Structures are given as structure tokens and as C-alpha cells.
Amino acid sequence: MAETINEVKFSDEAMAEIQRYISHYPEGRQKSAILPILHIAQAEFGGWVSPEVMDKVAEILNIQPIEVYEVATFYTMFNLKPVGKHVLEVCRTGPCCLRGADQVIEMIKQKLNIEEGETTADGMFTLKPVECLASCGTGPMLQVRELFYENIDSEEKLNEFLKMMRNKEHETPTWKK
Amino acid sequence: MGLKILTEHINVPGIETLEVYRKHGGYRSVEKALKTMTPDEVVEEVKTSGLRGRGGAGFPTGMKWSFLAKPEGVPRYLVCNADESEPGTFKDRWFMEHNPHALIEGMITSSFALGANTSYIYIRGELLFVLRILEKAIAEAYAAGLLGKNILGSGYDLDLHVAPGGGAYICGEETALLESLEGKRGNPRNKPPFPAVKGLFQCPTVVNNVETISSVPWIVNNGGAEYAKIGVGRSTGTKLISASGNINNPGVYEIELGVPVEEFIYSDQYCGGIWKGKQLKAVVPGGSSVPILPANLILKTAAGEDRLMSYESLSDGGFVSGSMLGSGAFIVFDEDQCIVRNTWNYARFYHHESCGQCSPCREGTGWMEKVLHRIEYGHGHQQDIDLLVSVSKQIEGNTICPLGDAAAWPVASAIRHFRHEFEWHINNPKEATTPGAVYRGQFDTVTA
């Protein structure tokens, strides 16, 4: 984990990973590494990318901050405001809905007393319905960080899942393992 | 059981490791191509095979490769499109997760054929866990001398990297993907110039789907002519089909192209019939962007013949009574599913995923979502149905990239085949908006 958000200092591990991604592209094309770096930044700084973090990414890539802002605001995976400890990204698209995704979203709203896009008062969960996650054969499903949780097809399974998440720390990004 | 080209060893424990993959014949195509063939010979074999792009468009792969410009002193690139985001499609994710070396082997052999010395696998950002699997497998390949300088002593060099996206369906479109790979917003480019002339970093580039590239090793090992013998007509080879929705056995199946649709839906070898013993109402056979077909039309062609799982048979009758094989995403609807709600769901998807570059798509997808929402929620008017048809026609064919068509076709086809269901929603708003309500009037049901 980085030291503090205000300092916007990536950990040594993260910086090594950032440099590795930059090395994948030809000289002068370092901007190509912007998406992997934003993923790393989000994992480093509490699950979202603040303007300060984006400025830091621009500095690392030697590009203008606006070039980072326009990318971060285009792609849906980057959270532009603070989120809860666990962001529940529930697939709301066709095939998952055929197996009950709408009901899963409704149950989560009721159980956590939040609406879509909101975070629970204890800061534990953010609900974020998302479009297709390529898990159509195992829906309803949701993603938390890098992991898929599939076949959430009953209230019992949802309860079990939420209980497990309450006792779980942040998923460690696998590049750190 | 049909012939398995891509999935023969997929259930072998440890197949994701280089050691086990090579024990089962992995990387033979790299040895063969780099040591005994010229790049042009590999391209010819792929042409002979009749392999068509498995991402959805179905364009002949060998022909696409032969379009690649080869100016002196300019690098060429192969980019694998692993940005699988089409609703209903999950075959590539599943395949990469379980058999990463098969894709890497295909990338090496295909890059050699194209004269590329640096290649990229662009994978959708949501699949970071698959990215880690691929990166681990790539590291193994580098350590074994299958990647890097002078691969297997052949004198051929290749660097292979994985690049994650950030969550945008549009990046599955090849030029949007290239923009994204260059670190920009995924706005599709005008064509021409095509990527084969000016692609990644303005250099000649081929963009191919995961399944397409992974099919190349078998073609190199066995010859294009052998591949062409599999399948039916111009639909040669095998195809991964991702089956979802109201079926007993959702999952990914490798089929020889030409299997009857009825067999695919009802056989225990594949989908295993309709979930909970219900009746078949409709199928979207190739991913959310292709036209939906009611039960009777998915089983029989316009000519009354058995509909087959092939590019030609599924499109028989054009859009009047046919659809498309697309990416092979087979979404099944039972009698309890509301077509209006489903159409609204897809319209919301395409509105959400429009990059906003072209007005017909940016505005039109929003209009369609809004109108469908009010019909679904009991506030529709009779003229809304024709309005939807009109808007879909104004989007179709009027955008830089195919997302406009992809957004328009589900709406137009749903109205074409299930207009009575939209009318019922408008005429019976109270009944239609009751939780669990579904139109049970005239539709062509099929019982196994």
C-alpha cells in the first residue's frame, strides 16, 4: 500500500510494475501504458483515482494531466470518487438477467440499505451494477476487485457471500503475491 | 462426440503449465513453422483452411493476413483481440483461463507468418485474473526460449505482451482497440486506412480474435486442407459456442460447424434442453448484437430445412427470418421471459457502451433505451413501436463503427418477430408491469 493518498507516492513494488508495463512499448510510446498504470493506481490508493493520483500518473508518463483525465473518465473501471472497502460490481446485462440478476441487485439494495452507486454507512460496501462481465454461463454473478463470484442464484448464497466479504480484507492484487 | 481442436486437452490437470502443455503436443506448430516453413507458406495454409474470424465478423483470416502491408523498415504488429465484452460471449475468457499456452502458441506461429516481432494481447480490463494467468504462461515461454531472441535457434525474434483495457465494450472494435492500446479513449477510427496499412502506432497491423489465433497451430500441424474438411460448406473447422440463458447446461462447447441447432439445444451433450422443463421461446444465436429469432425460426430455415450451427445456415433468409452466428454466443429464452424487458436491457447496454463519437449512435441508443423503458414500465404509446423502428433504421449503417448496427438490430428484430408483445405491454400496462408478468399470447413455442 502506498504511504498516503496526499503524498501520492507509489510503493516500490508498484513502481517496478509500472516500469515493466512502460517497457512493453516502443520508445516515445510510453503513454500506451496508461491503462495498466491506472489499474495499479486504483489498487494502490484505496480503490479510486483522485485528481492528484491522475496528476502523478501524468508525471510518470511525461504527458499532460488532461491526457490522463480523458482516459480515466472514458473507461468505466476507474472510480473517480471514494468507494467502500468492497465494490460489488453486479452484472446487470441480458444473460445474467435471464438467471435472476435483477433480483440479486434488489436483494443487495435491501440488505445493505443502499441504492446503486452508493456506499454503506460503515464504508464496507459500494454497489455498482455493471455491464456484461463475460460470465454469462454462470450468472447471476458479481465481481469484487479481480475475483468473480458466480451462480449467486439464491438469497442464501447471497447472504453467505456478504458474510464472507464482511470478514475479508481487500483482495491483494495478484501482481503483489 | 465431435472433433476437438481447441479443447482436446482442456480438462487435463496442469494443462495451463508449459510442461504439461508440451507433453500433450504443445508448441509443435512453432517448431514446424519456424524451422521448416516460410511465413508465406503459413499464410497459404491458413487461407486453404477457410478459417474465418471467430470474433463475430467471420471474415476469412488468411485473406485478412494477405492484406498486410509490408513496407521496408517499418515494424508490423499482431494484436490479439481478447476484449470479449459482447453479452452472451464468454468463450475466450474461459479458453484463456484454462489453456493459456494454446493462445501463446497461436500468437507465436501467427506473428511469424505476418513478420511481426512484437505482438500484444489486448484483454478486457475486467479480466485481470486472466491477464495474470497469461503473463505467467508467457514468462514460462520466454524461459523456454519460445519467446524472445532467436526462438528455438530459428533466427526469428518475438516479444509478446499483455495489455489490459479499462472497461469499454467499444474496444472490441478493432480500431477502437488500437486507440486504447495507444493509451487513448477507445474511439473507433475512420476506415480507410485499414489497420493492415496503418494500425498500431501507424504501422501495418493485424487484429485477430483469441479463438481465431488459437486455431492456427492445428492448421499448421495438420494442414489447411485437413481443416477445410471439417464443418460444412464455407463454415470450416470447429467453433467455440458459449451457451447461456434458460438452458440446463450453460457453458462453452466446441462443435464442428454444422451441428443442427435443435441438437445443440436439446442434446445432453450440449445445452441439455430448456431449464426447469419449460418451453423454448426464442434464441439470440450469436451474441446480443445479432437478431433474435423465435423458436420456430431458430430451428428451421426459411426454406424449411433444419437450421444448422454455421455461418450460412444461421443467416439464411437474411434478417427477415434469419440471424447470424456472430461470436457464437447462444442465448436461450424460455417461455417466462419478457422480450420487451430483454430488449430494453440490451438497449441500455448499447447506450451505456456507445463511445459518443457519432450522433446517430450517441443519441439514437439513448432514445431507444428511453422509449423501451417507458413501454416496459407501462407508459408506452402505440406510435412508440414505429418510432423505435424508425430510430433503429436511422442508426443502422450511419456510424463509423458497427456498434450502431449492433444496437439497432436487437430492437428491430424484437419488434419484427414479437410486435404483439410490445403491443400487449402498451395496451395492458397494469398487467404488463405486474412483477413476473409475461405475455403468454401468440408466440411459436417448441417442446422437446
Image: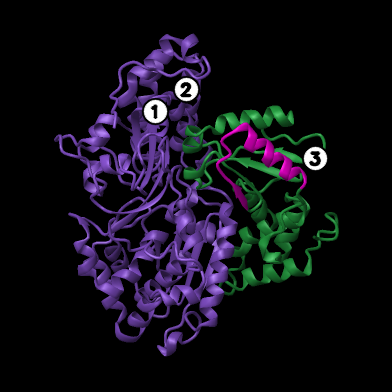
Q: Position of residue A75 (x, y in %)?
A: 59, 48
Magenta stretch: give its range. A147-167
Label 3 and label 1: CA atoms lie apart by 43 Å
| Residue at the spot of label 3 | A123
Circle 1: residue type: Val
- Identify the hue of chain B: purple
**Residue visible at 51% across and 57% down in the picture:** B179
Question: Which structural element holds mark 1?
Answer: helix
Labels 3 and 2 within one chain: no
Label 3 and label 2: CA atoms lie apart by 36 Å
Whether tag 2 and tag 1 are in contact, CB under 8 A, the answer is yes
Q: In this rendering, does residue B94 appear at all?
A: yes
User: Which label number is shown at residue B391?
Assistant: 1
Q: As rendered, which of B24 and B382 lies closer to the eye?
A: B24
User: In the rendered structure, which disc, 2 or 1, sits on the residue that comes first in sequence?
Assistant: 2
Q: As rendered, which of B37 and B281 lies closer to the eye?
A: B281
Circle 3: residue type: Gly
Q: Is residue B382 above or below residue B285?
A: above
Quadrant of res B338: top left
Is B279 positioned to the left or the right of B301 in the image?
right
User: Subunit of mark 3?
Assistant: A
